[in-house]
Image (cartoon, rainbow, N blue to C red):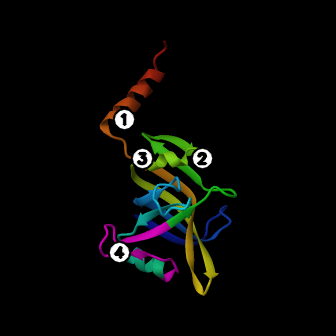
């Protein structure tokens, strides 16, 4: 995973931006209904394996979840919603990009991904005597893990497009 902690990103309008490439997503709930405790909230976690990344994120005020009895043991929770402008989400399958909307984002719960690239922003809060930083999704590019049968299907689809009849 490649992590950059930036003050802001041109055009995002947000401060406290994280630029993350080649991330591994775990415990994904794109529908907001995958787990009994979801309460309609859409989220996923990023596996953080590098100690330098963990330290940098903690120093920047981000909350890293650490569980000794889990693999991965260190994760960063990412929340998202389509209220307001919502995130830009793209699924890449065999080099073909598909824009994901609120109408079809729940379908992502049924897919596997090799990796993901994303832009995130932090939102600082103080509530009921507690404070912290919640992470929200701005942009996400997911690379679908395609099995050998799907690979054959997609290659057949491409050759059918070249067929003149």
Mark 4, other Cα within 10 Å: few <14 / some 14–19 / many ≥20: few
Q: Which residues are magenta?
A: 59-77
Q: Position of residue 33 (x, y in %)?
A: 51, 55
Mark found first going from the N terminus, 1 or 4? 4
Q: Position of residue 63 (x, y in %)?
A: 48, 77
> In the picture shown, does residue 68 fall above or below 109?
below
First in residue order: circle 2 vs circle 3:
2
Residue 20 appears left or right of 102: left
Q: CA distance from mark 4 to mark 2?
A: 33 Å
* Picture disc at residue 101: 2
**Disc 4 and disc 3: Cα gap in Å?**
25 Å
User: Can you say whether 150 is above or below 83 in the image?
Assistant: above
Residue under pointer 4 = 67
In the picture, the disc for residue 118 is none
Q: Mark 3 highlights which residue?
A: 111
Closest to the observer, 116 or 10: 116
Helix, strand or loop at disc 1?
A: helix
Is there a contact, CB below 8 Å, between mark 4 and mark 2?
Answer: no
Q: Quadrant of the N terminus?
A: bottom left
User: In the rendered structure, which disc, 2 or 1, sits on the residue that comes first in sequence?
Assistant: 2
Q: Quarter-wise, where is residue 121 in the image?
A: bottom right
Q: Residue at x 31, y 76 (%)?
A: 68
Q: Secondary structure at mark 3?
A: loop
Q: Are marks 2 and 1 in contact (CB under 8 Å)?
A: no
Within 10 angstroms of label 1, few (less than 14), some, or many (20 or more) residues?
Answer: few
Q: Which residue is mark 1?
A: 150
Q: Is residue 23 visible?
A: no
Q: Is residue 57 left or right of residue 155?
A: right
Q: CA distance from mark 1 to mark 3?
A: 12 Å
Taking the magenta stretch, the answer to whether it contains residue 133 is: no
């Amino acid at each position: 995973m490649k992590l950059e902690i930036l003050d802001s990103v041109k055009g995002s309008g947000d401060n406290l931006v994280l630029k993350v490439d080649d991330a591994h997503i775990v415990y994904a709930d794109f529908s907001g209904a995958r787990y009994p405790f979801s309460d309609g909230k859409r989220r996923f976690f990023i596996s953080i394996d590098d100690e330098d990344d963990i330290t940098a994120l903690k120093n920047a005020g981000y909350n890293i979840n650490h569980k000794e009895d889990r693999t991965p043991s260190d994760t960063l929770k990412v929340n998202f919603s389509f209220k307001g402008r919502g995130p830009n989400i793209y699924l890449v399958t065999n080099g073909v990009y598909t824009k994901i909307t609120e109408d079809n984002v729940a379908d992502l719960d049924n897919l596997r991904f090799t990796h993901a690239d994303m832009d995130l922003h932090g939102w600082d809060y103080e509530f009921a005597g507690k404070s912290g930083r919640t992470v929200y999704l701005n942009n996400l590019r997911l690379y679908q893990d395609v099995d050998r049968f799907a690979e054959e299907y997609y290659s057949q689809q491409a050759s059918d497009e070249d067929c003149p009849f």
